[in-house]
Image: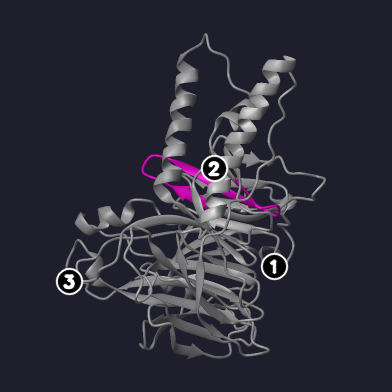
Amino acid sequence: MSRRNHLTDLGTISNLDLTELGAGKENWLDNPNLLCAFDTDSLAIANRYYLLVLEWSHASDHATFRVKIRPNLSPIEAEYVSALEWLVFDDIRVIAVGTSCGYLLIYSLGGDLIHKQLVYPGRILRLRVRGTKRDITEDTSSFEEVCVVIPGIIARFDGSDIQRVLQRWYQETQNRFWNQSSTDKSLEEYESSSSPIPYQCWNVSKYGSCVDAAVTGVMPPPLLELQSSDRYYCAVTIGADAAISAFRLSEDRSRSFVGAILSKVVPATFSTIASFSKLVWRTQQPTKKPEPKPQPFARAFPLTCLKDHPRKGEKLTLSPSGTLAAITDSLGRIMLLDTRALVVVRLWKGYRDASCLFVERLVNKDSREHIKNDYCLCLAIHAPRKGIVEIWQMRTGPRILTVPCPKGSRILQPTYRFGSTFAASSSTSYKPLEVFFLNGDSGQLSRLN
């Protein structure tokens, strides 16, 4: 099969000087410390200490520099950038950065720090952005989220909470721009005035520390349990000790009655004593910025576990609805997991160091304006040792396409757009999931037809 029959060239990054990232060397994109996050016309590339944002204009196929961001990392803790992802809303596009010390940083496309928050002390392995919508035939709740994966820990941010913080920051920035008499806030003042984004945090290390995890969706509560307003989520984790494990996540932090009383009474008592002592001694001590503390864990109930030594889980990829997960392991196998039944429904062998992405293939070519039902779900498997990308139809369909892929290339996919699933259900034109190829040697960016 000819390469040009299946790929469409979109642009190139060969015109840019990326020697700081290792460009110019053979297979420089294979560097594990090099992180890539792709959007429609933008590409963010980060190494351990800074990141670059590249953009393509419609008039030219050559990429241009948008911004270079160097996060304020702790030299004492040897902190570095460990995760990277885009956050795309209707009118807002920002970059989310995870660090090795457990901090979540959000930057604007101008390089300004919008938000900084400690999730949990530990290296952030993955920032996963996804969402689902209520379907007519399926009883699932609508939610959009950002998941933060730390070894043995998974945290979940609601997309609406992040959107409110971003809208408030952009509104304050615009007000300061138009109000010339007001002085700009410094970084320390803004960080102290901004409140942390609410999130849930769970400990999922019962079967060992995980290397990747995902919240697959909302699930019903346990049997014989009283119905409440709390949601239950299903989480799938993979790691070295357990190739696959699943948990039921609750929003309840399960604190005891005595602990709940103490958590309310003790701070109030301490605050009263401190205020009284200030009135007596009339001393003004300099206020110190409190150190951030991690949030207490909510309840996580183990559901199932697959231990098959020496098999180790390596990468996890979720389908758009969250009902399927493609998991690669250290034995060169790819398992297709049904996240609702928690059963492996398909297995591929002989794909070492592989990576997977879910794509959608057009099957109904009669209509001019395609809708979601005109596409079928497929799995793209990138086998770097074979130098190919295979497209398999889900769930048990055949292999429908094989595309040559040069060594040193990466397959990318645009990040999830918040609110896009709701618009897709009513819009006549539907944008399917696509796969893009980034060739490290030539710098060419291509789209799979």
Label annotation for residue 27: 1
**Closer to the camera in the image, 2 or 45:** 45
Task: Choose the circle earlier in sequence order: 2 or 3.
Answer: 2
Q: Which residues are magenta?
A: 85-104
Distance from disc 2 to disc 3, alpha carbons, whole Å, reads 64 Å
Image quarter (top left, top right, bottom left or bottom right) of the C terminus: bottom left
Query: Hey, what amino acid is under mark 2?
Result: Lys
Please name the residue that numbered disc 3 is placed on.
Answer: 366
Measuring from the top left, give residue 181's x and y in whole percent: 52, 8
**Closer to the camera in the image, 259 or 32:** 259
Main SS, magenta region, reads: strand
Residue 273 in magenta? no
Residue at position x 51%, y 11% from top?
A: 180
Residue at position x 41%, y 76% from top?
A: 324
Residue at position x 66%, y 81% from top?
A: 241
Does dot 3 land on a helix, a strand or a loop?
loop
Image quarter (top left, top right, bottom left or bottom right) of the N terminus: bottom left
Task: Choose the circle earlier in sequence order: 3 or 1.
Answer: 1
Label annotation for residue 264: 2
